Image (cartoon, rainbow, N blue to C red):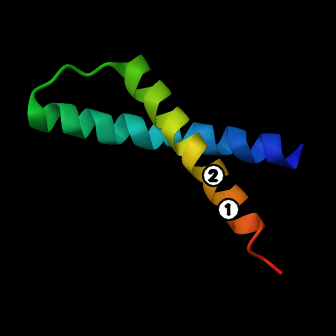
Amino acid sequence: MKFIISNLLVIFWAVIFGEIIGYIASQLTGLNYNLTEIGVVSAVVVLIAVNALTLISKHSVK
């Protein structure tokens, strides 16, 4: 249960920060701001990164 809750929190914050960064980047570059695409991409990338980092570091502890 702790694993699921921590992943849900990671997804929540990844979407929020991804939307903020995506909005700023779209305004600076003049590209269209797509709310759904930015949220999904940021959530997937951060979820993969966090779980990979956890998996790698879990086995290095003696």
Question: In the image, what residue type sits under mark 1?
Answer: Ile
Q: Position of residue 43 (x, y in %)?
A: 53, 35
Q: Which residue is mark 1?
A: 56
Q: Which residue is mark 2?
A: 52
- What's the residue at 62%, 45% (across, down)? 10
Rendered position, 55 above or below 25: below
Q: Quadrant of residue 32?
A: top left
Q: Residue furthest right?
A: 1
Q: Classify 10 Å Cα crowding around label 2: few (below 14), some (14-19), many (20 and above).
A: few
Mark 2 residue element: helix
- What's the residue at 32%, 42% (across, down)? 21
- What's the residue at 45%, 36% (across, down)? 42
Please identify the quadrant where the N terminus is shown.
top right
Mark 1 residue element: helix
Q: Position of residue 37 (x, y in %)?
A: 40, 20
Number of marks in picture: 2
Please tell me the numbered disc located at residue 18: none
Label 1 with label 2: CB-CB less than 8 Å: yes
Rendered position, 52 above or below 39: below
Q: Nearer the viewer, residue 49 or 40?
A: 49
Rendered position, 33 above or below 6: above
Q: Classify 10 Å Cα crowding around label 1: few (below 14), some (14-19), many (20 and above).
A: few
- What's the residue at 74%, 47% (across, down)? 6
Question: In the image, what residue type sits under mark 2?
Answer: Ala
Q: Position of residue 56 (x, y in %)?
A: 67, 62
Please identify the quadrant where the C terminus is shown.
bottom right
